[in-house]
Amino acid sequence: MPTYKYIARTVTGERLDGTMDAPSVDAVASQLVNNNTTPVEIYDAGEKDSLLTRIDKRLIGLPKANDLILLCRQLHTLLKAGVPIDRCFSGLSASAENPMLKEALIDISLQMESGRELSASFNRYPDMFPSLFVSMVHVGENTGKLDDVFATLARQLELERVTRAQIKSALRYPTFVMIAIFLAMGVLLVFVVPSFAKFFEHHGAELPMMTQIILGVSHFVTTYWLHLIIVFVAFILGLRKYGRSEEGRLHWDRIKLKLPLVGHILYRATLSRFSHTFAMCLSAGVPIVVALNLVAKAVDNIHVEKNILAMREGLERGESLFQTASRTEMFSPLVLQMISVGEEAGAVDTMLKEVGIFYDREVSYDIKKLSASIEPILTLFIGGIVLVLALGIFMPMWSISSAMKG
């Protein structure tokens, strides 16, 4: 009996992945429906998971952010003009420049013709369409506002692209400087410092503690350089493997929001995404508990997702949105006050839009001052290295030179 892999959704929207031995795909689907779950994707475990696995991703390359932004804008325009969705995808697949995106759009069009939901069709390509994309499309399907969803997605993806580009631009110079410093330190420790060590040993100089530490580090690096490379590579591979696990992703998603200099930017960008998505769900008439469940999947951060689901559980117990939001400790007093006012006035969606705009401005401001924050830290770091080298290497040289003249 063949083995099938499946992806399904529970009544609360949670994703289930698993395998099942059954005579056919229909038998698997029937079993999942009997278990109160909705089948999203079912395929033979012996076959390739999707159409994209037949294409070498490393050679072709996944669609870039600009491709997805253009796709969202085109879908918004076509749907707003009343073009049937199947014709939208058949037309867009013909004009798509990226080969992987073209193949995906053709497959999505075929999936919809067979009765599959649009969000489920997008979900077949997790490497191409992020969880935010799929969740937002799901919201649009439930509310009948797919054109507005694609317009919102285009704005959100554009904002994230600009934010990412600005952060990279701000970090580019410090990164180059740090790489140059570490390369210079490597050259000094491997080639230069050993020469000084021989010189000091020849003259029998009494070396200060700083010099002894530098010589010791140099000796360790030149002796065990191969071991250090192996340990470094093993550490990177182990870190990547841990980061892909559920526990590792949760740990990293929690840490990256507290990273120096950039953590608060990522934090505010995440809350901006939460606010805009939640406001859109509420304004579309989605029940608040269901909206929180959808938004939790859209924030693309497991740590924040758990807090949002905790808010949903609090609402199910009869607590107010303000109370549950306060308990998560994710929001600033200003945001909590706006949520409280929104609940009292019956305009939570309007207040959340204002919250999203507020965080957008904060992110833009923080990015602009990022370079100014890094420069003094970088200057102090370089100065510290120069000071260590001066005290550790040149001071003994001057002492020996003075003794020889005396």
Image (cartoon, grey):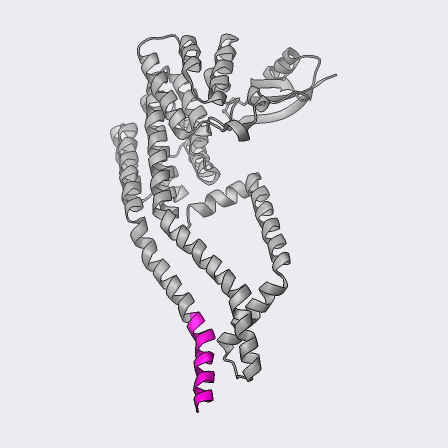
Q: Please, is residue 350 above or below residue 256 in the view? A: above
Residue sitting at x 58%, y 44%? 242
Which quarter of the image is occupied by the N terminus? top right
List the single residue furthest toward the bottom: 406
Front position in the image: 110 or 178: 178
In magenta stretch: residue 401: yes
Front position in the image: 242 or 341: 242
Residue sitting at x 37%, y 30%? 157
List the single residue furthest toward the right: 1
Front position in the image: 201 or 214: 201
Q: Can residue 391 be seen from the camera position used here?
A: yes
Total marks in image: 0
From the top left corner, tell me how far across and down residue 156 is, in percent: 35, 30
Q: Please, is residue 301 above or below residue 134 in the view? A: below
Q: Please, is residue 164 above or below residue 386 in the view? A: above
Q: Can residue 37 be seen from the camera position used here?
A: no
From the top left corner, tell me how far across and down residue 188 is, in percent: 50, 65
**Magenta region, main secondary structure:** helix
Residue sitting at x 50%, y 75%? 211
Kindly indicate the quadrant of the structure image that contains residue 359: top left
Instruction: Give the extent of the magenta segment.
Output: 388-406
From the top left corner, tell me how far across and down residue 372 is, in percent: 29, 53
From the top left corner, tell me how far across and down residue 2 is, in percent: 72, 17
In magenta stretch: residue 397: yes
